[in-house]
Amino acid sequence: MKTLVIRNPARGNIVCPRVLLANNFWTRGKGLLGRKGLDESEGILLVPGSSIHMFGMKFAIDVVFLTKDHLVTDFVENIGPGKAHVARNNAGKPHSALEIAAGTISKCGVQIGDQLELEDVV
């Protein structure tokens, strides 16, 4: 799978340095299932993805929903196992879901309307 770094120029920080791109049926379907946790430097970007579920998960995560142009349209913090969330259309139509370690949104100061940058890791 392709690996990305996600930056937030509006806040001057890196949201997540190692994000796996899940952009096909198999990688999106597997997502983070089967894992026991998520390191704060790891994440997964589900494309497309305007909703998520935590059925079968063993740990909580933060989720940032992005438009096709990577504008933050919605987010949910510390969503735990057994829960689900459908992205709201706050700043544009949700297109992808960035799943990151719980606490990252607060730590990085991500806000609705922020324009994130996605870069390939080489």
Image (tube, grey):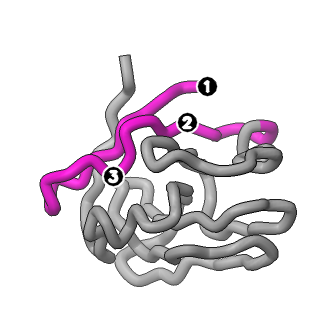
Q: Which residues are magenta?
A: 1-26
- Label ID, residue 78: none
Q: Does the CB distance between marks 3 and 2 fall below 8 Å?
A: no
Q: Which residue is mark 3?
A: 15
* Amino acid on which the number 2 mark rests in the picture: Leu
Residue at (20, 51) in percent of width and height? 13
- Label ID, residue 20: 2
Q: Does the CB distance between marks 2 and 1 fall below 8 Å?
A: yes
SS assignment at label 3: strand
Query: For the residues marked 2 and 1, what is the alpha-carbon distance in whole angstroms?
Result: 6 Å
Q: Position of residue 73 (x, y in %)?
A: 41, 73
Q: Quadrant of residue 116?
A: bottom left
Answer whether residue 2 is magenta in the image: yes
- As drawn, the residue found furthest toward the top would be 122
Residue at (44, 35) in percent of width and height? 18
Q: Position of residue 12 (x, y in %)?
A: 13, 54
Q: Which residue is mark 1?
A: 1
Indicate left or right for 40 with 69 as reference.
right
